[in-house]
Image (cartoon, rainbow, N blue to C red):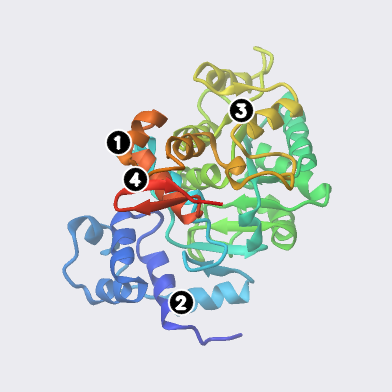
């Protein structure tokens, strides 16, 4: 086992534990001065903003970064950060959408992760995945619909993504594995633990043929608040979320609410009104989710936002892959002269904060060029 880690690796491992889960003040400091200086300042007990101090005080002097990295290495997983080539920078820009900013008033998890522990094929983060979520004790109808959903998604070339919980999550992962296709599981505990224990075999199969993800360091136990924070990662890493079964109050509905606020499509299967799994699905439909009754409808709904089920043709343009709201902003920018933020906002009809976030994303994708606070389309 190697025990030689860089100063930056040790700093990231320390930061991944010192403030558990999403922490906006810590992320801001990392962006300002970098991970190494941030770790040193926190460990030294220097004066910190109150918001950050309250998050790190309990673990400041508990530096086990060397041990965490050794455990990860021994168990075949690693810590990736924004510097990693597979880090989904563009995917995480949705955390700047206005609905997510509004959510921060009531939910401390409404921030992107600053590091992730991963095991398996990290290149899967570049693939288009679809979340499949639902009840932990699904009815027969829920089980059947989950299998249909996973089978159809795989046939269309999507990667099935879920949380490896009992019930719908486990069925979705199992179907993908049975079909010889990769699947992604986002966990609410350290990757050196298997939860639930009944899914030990599945855990190892996903590690071998897919990808396991967690923002929690080794040894972290599953807990309710961690599952709720985990749900936002399920939503953000997927191009859409399909709910196959859910009670009136369900963790699946929490995942769906994250997806909705992120501008992702939420799809729900209808059930018999006598089915205990009907209430949550029907509730989602009443609240604006799209009702789907076959795999083709799932494909159509996901493709409607630009996430095409079929490969792009040779004549296709990069803008064909944009989400609806992103394309609205791109189309609001003139190809002939620099366009102001005010003009783009008025033309797109989107909130100003969302427009600015999308503009920055489009610049990073080399679709737009910024010129002194104005934007113009990138010439072919």
Q: Which of 268/314 is in front?
A: 314
Q: Earlier in the sequence, mark 1 or mark 3?
A: 3
Mark 1 or 4: in front is 1
Res 108 label: 4
Q: Which residue is mark 1?
A: 342
Q: Residue furthest top?
A: 273
Q: Which residue is mark 2?
A: 9
Secondary element at tag 4: loop
**Total marks in image:** 4
Q: Residue furthest right?
A: 179
Label whose residue precedes the other's in the sequence (2 or 1): 2
The span from disc 4 to disc 2 (Cα, nearest Å) is 26 Å
Q: Is 243 situated above or below 197?
A: above
Pointers 1 and 3 in contact (C-beta within 8 Å)? no
The correct choice, above or below, for 337 with respect to 66 in the image is above
Q: Position of residue 168 (x, y in %)?
A: 67, 37
For label 3, the residue is 267
Q: Secondary structure at mark 2?
A: helix
Decide if residue 109 is in sight here.
no
Q: Nearer the viewer, residue 145 or 346?
A: 346
Distance in Å between CA atoms under marks 2 and 1: 42 Å
């Amino acid at each position: 086992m190697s025990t030689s880690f860089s100063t930056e690796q040790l700093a990231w491992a320390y930061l991944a534990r010192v403030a558990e889960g999403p922490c906006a003040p810590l992320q801001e400091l990392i962006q300002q001065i970098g991970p190494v200086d941030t770790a040193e300042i926190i460990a030294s007990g220097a004066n910190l903003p109150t918001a950050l101090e309250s998050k790190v005080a309990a673990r400041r002097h508990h530096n086990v970064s060397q041990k965490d990295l050794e455990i990860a290495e021994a168990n075949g997983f690693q810590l990736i950060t924004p510097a990693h080539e597979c880090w989904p920078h563009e995917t995480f820009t949705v955390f700047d959408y206005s609905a997510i900013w509004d959510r921060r008033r009531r939910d401390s998890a409404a921030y992107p992760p600053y590091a992730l522990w991963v095991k398996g094929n990290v290149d899967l983060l570049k693939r288009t995945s679809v979340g499949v979520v639902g009840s932990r004790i699904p009815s027969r109808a829920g089980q059947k619909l989950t299998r249909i959903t996973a089978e159809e998604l795989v046939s269309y070339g999507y990667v099935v993504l879920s949380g490896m919980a009992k019930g719908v999550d486990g069925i979705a992962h199992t179907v993908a594995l049975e079909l010889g296709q990769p699947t992604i599981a986002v966990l609410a505990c350290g990757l050196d633990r298997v939860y639930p224990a009944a899914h030990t075999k599945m855990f190892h199969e996903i590690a071998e043929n897919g990808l396991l993800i967690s923002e929690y360091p080794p040894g972290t136990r599953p807990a309710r608040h961690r599952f709720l924070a985990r749900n936002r990662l399920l939503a953000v890493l997927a191009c859409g979320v399909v709910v196959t079964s859910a009670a009136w109050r369900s963790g699946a509905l929490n995942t769906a609410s994250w997806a909705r606020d992120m501008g992702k499509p939420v799809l729900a299967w209808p059930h018999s009104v006598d089915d205990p799994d009907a209430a949550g699905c029907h509730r989602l439909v009443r609240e604006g989710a799209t009702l789907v009754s076959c795999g083709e409808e799932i494909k159509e709904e996901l493709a409607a936002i630009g996430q095409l089920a079929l490969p792009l043709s040779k004549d296709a343009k990069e803008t064909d892959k944009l989400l609806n709201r992103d394309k609205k902003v791109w189309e609001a920018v003139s190809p002939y002269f620099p366009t102001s933020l005010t003009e783009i906002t008025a033309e797109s009809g989107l909130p100003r904060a969302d427009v600015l976030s999308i503009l920055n994303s489009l610049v990073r994708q080399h679709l737009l060029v910024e010129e002194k606070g104005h934007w113009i389309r990138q010439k072919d």
